[in-house]
Amino acid sequence: MTKDGGKQDKKAAQYGVTPQSADFNDWYNEVVKKADLADNSPVAGAMVVRPYGSALWENIVRWLDDRFKATGHESLVFPTLIPMGFIMKEADHVEGFAPELFTVNKIGTEELAEPYVMRPTSETIIGHMWSGWLNSYRDLPFLHYQWGSVFRAELRTKAFLRTSEFFWHEGHTAHADEPEARAEVRQMLDIYHEFCRDILALPVVRGEKTASERFAGAVATYSIEGMMRDGKALQSGTSHYLGQNFSRAFDVKFQTREQKEEFAHTTSWAISSRIIGAIIMTHGDDFGLIMPPRIAPIQVVVIPVGRKDNFDQMVEEGEKLAAELRAQGLRVKVDKRDGVTNGFKYNNWELKGVPVRIELGPRDLESGVVVVKNRNGEEKETLARAEAVSGMTARLDEIHDWLYGRATEYLLNHTLTVDTYEAFQEAIEGGNWVRAYHCGDAACEKSIKDDTKATTRNVPLDDAEFFHEAGEGVCVKCGRPSAYGKRVIFGRQY
C-alpha cells in the first residue's frame, strides 16, 4: 500500500475497488471479477475462468509440468467418474470425503446398479489400476500424475479458493520401500516450495500437518502454508505419504528381490487453482492485482499515446517496441484500443497487475525515449528506448524480489510467539499467526479451534525457511508437555 492512505483510498474508489482495509473480502471478490480473472457461473458453486485467469493457470501448469517431467514423472489421464465401491474400500478416505461427494445414480432414466462419484481425488481408481499393472520390483517406481478437475461440494464458495469444481494436478507414486516413498514426498514438497519462492514470489512455511489435519487415509501429510494480506493462512500445496494403506485396500503388491510378496508404499501430492487465490491475496493492493513477473500472463504492456491523426502510426511503433521485448523472451501486449482514454488504460492495466507499463508518444519517438512505470511503484521514468529494452529482464527480476521481500516482511511481522492462552487469543483476534507449543492431542486442537477459529497450520520442518527452531515447552492451551520438539504454527485459514 502507499504511504498516503487518503490518496490511495481516493484512487481506489476511481477504480471501483473496495480498499483492503475497508473490507478484504469485498476487495478480493471485486478484483477477481474486474481484473477479468473469473466470473460466476449458472452452476452453483462453480466458476468460469476467463481468458486472463486461464492464461495465468496455463503458465502455472507449464512450469510445474516441466519440473515433473524433469524429475522422471509421467502424465496419464483417468476418468472423472469413480465407482462408489472404490471410495468405500478405504475407511478413513470414506469418512474424510463423504460429505463432499457428488454422486451419479442414473444414466438417462435408468438407475445404476452401483453409483459413481465425481472424482474428489484419484487414489482409489489409480490404486485399482496399479494392482493390474504391478508385478515385480522391477516395475517400480510408478511416477504418475494427471491434470484435471476435481469435485467437492462447497456450501460457502469463493472464486479460486473454495469452489465445488476446481483445477489441479494430482501426483501418485508407488515405491518398493518406505524410505524411497518418503524421499519422493519431500522432493515434491521442495519443488512446490521452489515454485512459490522463485516463480510466484510467495514465502511459504514447509511443515508436517498434525494428525487431525492429515489427508484422509495418509500416514503423514506435509504442506506449504502462505500468509495472505489479511493474516489468514492458505494451504498452498500438499504432499502425502500414504504408507501401505491404499495399496492394501486395492491389492497393489509386487514380488520383491527375495521372491516375497509385498505391498507398495504410495504417495500423492497436489497444487490446485487455489494458488491463484494466494497470488491475488499475497501481492494485491488497493489498486488491484500485482502479478509476479515470472508467471504473469502479460509481463509488459505497451500503450501507444497519440491523437486521431497519428494513433495508427504510434500503434505501429508500439508493435516494433513489443517485438524487441519479445525477442528477449518476454510476454508483451500492445494496447491498441481506440476511443478509450489513456487514463482508463493505465488504470485498467494496474488493476490487472501487469508488472511494467511502457508509454510511447510522438515526442518520445522523436527523442528516442519511452516512459516506464512499474506496477509496484508510483513514479514514472523516462529512459532511452534501448536502455528500457535491454534492462527489462533485470527490472522484472527486481519487481519479483520486491514482492517476495514485502510478503516476507508481512509474514514475519504478523507471526507472533506466545506462551499463554490469553496472548494466543489476542494474537489470533488481531489477524496474526501464532507460534506456540502444543500437546498434540486432537481434542485440545479442537478446543482451540472452537474458541478462536484457529487451526494448526503445520509443524515447520527442521530445514524450513521460517520458524524451524527447536525447543521444548508446555501446551499453550492445557499445560501438558509439547509433543513436537518445536512450536506449532496456528492461524485462521481459507
Image (cartoon, helix red, strand yellow):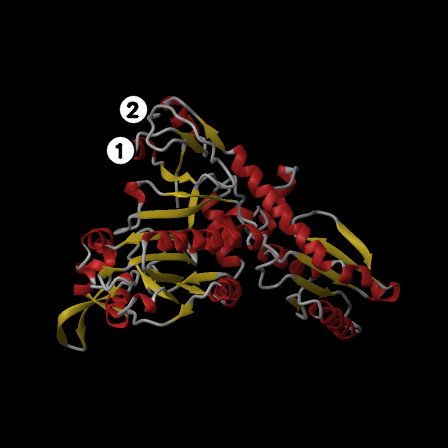
Q: Nearer the viewer, residue 479 or 96?
A: 479
Name which residue lies at 60% across and 50% down: 14
Name which residue lies at 40% across and 52% down: 183
Secondary element at tag 2: loop
Q: Nearer the viewer, residue 107 or 200?
A: 200
Which x, y percent locates residue 72?
Answer: 45, 66
Residue flagged by tag 2: what amino acid is it?
Answer: Arg
Residue 413 is drawn in which quadrant?
A: top right
Residue 45 visible to an observer of this rendering: yes
Residue flagged by tag 1: what amino acid is it?
Answer: Asp
Q: Nearer the viewer, residue 234 or 85?
A: 85
Instruction: Determine which residue is flagged by label 2.
Output: 480
- How many neighbours does mark 1 have within 10 angstroms: few (below 14), some (14-19), or many (20 or more)? some
Residue occupying the far front of the picture? 258
> Is 428 rendered above or below residue 398?
above
Instruction: Determine which residue is flagged by label 1.
Output: 441
Residue 1 is drawn in which quadrant?
A: top right
Residue 158 visible to an observer of this rendering: no
Is the Cβ of the residue at disc 2 closer than 8 Å to that at disc 1?
yes
Give left or right: position of 308 versus 69: right
